[in-house]
Image: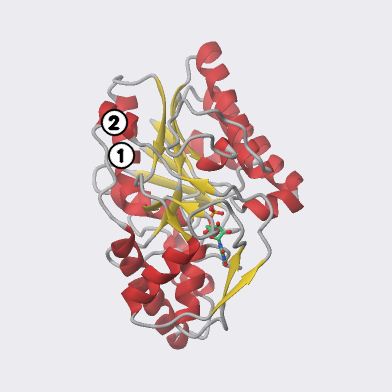
Amino acid sequence: MILVVGGAGYIGSHIVKELIKSTKVVIFDNLSTGHGWAVDNNAIFIQGDLGKEEDLEKVFSTYSIDAVMHFAANSLVEESVINPWKYYENNVAATLTLLKIMMKYGVKNFIFSSTAAIYGIPKEDFLTEQSLTNPINPYGRSKLIIEQILEDFSQAYGMRYVVLRYFNAAGAHESSLIGESHDPETHLIPIILQHLLGKREKVLVFGSDYNTRDGTCIRDYIHVTDLAHAHILSLNALLTGKKQTATYNLGNGTGYSVKEVIEACEAVTGRQATIEYVERRMGDPSQLIASSEKINRELGWKAKIKLPEIIESAWSWHKKMVGLEKENSLEHADWFVIKNRDRYL
Ligand code: UDP
């Protein structure tokens, strides 16, 4: 049985959809940023707080857990600059509590969601796992601290782990049942699509004076379903003993500027965006592009879904969300809780 911490969140819920095809899954989530409607009906769901030992004890004492996948984190760069305490509390202290309970129950396999933000300002065009790690914001630092803790725990306690450093996760599940939905939304692709659906007046482009081909930031966008496949391969590598510890970058290996992403959204939707250039956002490096050669070589993973398809899947999801909002006067989360109350412990 696999425990997915943060399985009601954007990335976690997509991984659950893949995992559930071959194994039993327990989702643990406090629904602070995740959604009740994103919880897969075939998984066991436990609502609880990662930082509370008693909530975790309930899970580990009830179920026989083979491995833990950990997605529960705060992940907004600018927010982390403004409120670093929240990031060290939720991303570092709470994860440490999870690791402590795992050790107590002898659960040694761990998959950790890390981020390209640990690299800071890159010195090379393509970041490899050997590139210098020098995060420039508390979010990146909070993730790097856990990576370092995992190294120590593997040495001292025989912990087995795979660290997956995501570049920019985007897109939605092929079913359009789940997709990216944050409140407030801060991510580029959902913001552009919300604007193109008439839910926002314009798209603000944060910074036009970066040292890039068009002055806007460059990122490497990766579809959540590609991410999900990398998690399954990593889990199998741990459970079969093929890997004791590993760290991998997950990206497409192609960088798109903010302007290019807006143009790609216009092409997919056939709609024109209104753009306003504003100040740089705090904590943003100019360019982050992955080399994912290592996971390709060692586990045979390669991203398959390119930016236009990523946007198409997100567009289907966003159009559906608008329809749902019209149909349901209740918030999605409340609607789900009412219908599924007996699944809550
Ligand atoms: N961005 C932007 N306008 C927005 C949201 C994002 O210009 O409304 C830019 C942001 O500054 C960054 C890129 O788009 O350069 C991707 O940002 P996002 O928040 O999606 O992901 P991040 O790279 O922060 O993980």
| Total numbered badges shown on the rendered structure | 2
Q: Are marks 2 and 1 in contact (CB under 8 Å)?
A: yes
Q: Residue at x 42, y 45 (%)?
A: 26
- Which is more toward the observer, 264 or 82? 264
Q: Residue at x 68, y 36 (%)?
A: 93
For label 1, the residue is 232
Quadrant in which ligand 1 is drawn: bottom right
For label 2, the residue is 236
Is 193 on the left or on the right of 182, as rendered?
left
Dot 2: few (<14), some (14–19), or many (≥20) neighbours within 10 Å?
some
From this view, report whether residue 17 is shown above or below residue 54. Answer: below
Q: Residue at x 46, y 25 (%)?
A: 130
Badge 1 element:
helix
Amino acid type assigned to the residue bearing label 2 in the image: Asn
Locate the N terminus and report the quarter of the image it occupies: top left
Q: Is mark 2 within 8 Å of ligand 1?
A: no
Dot 1: few (<14), some (14–19), or many (≥20) neighbours within 10 Å?
some
Which percent across, then down, holds residue 144?
A: 59, 32
Q: Residue at x 49, y 62 (%)?
A: 258
Badge 2 element:
helix
- Which is more toward the observer, 17 or 304? 304
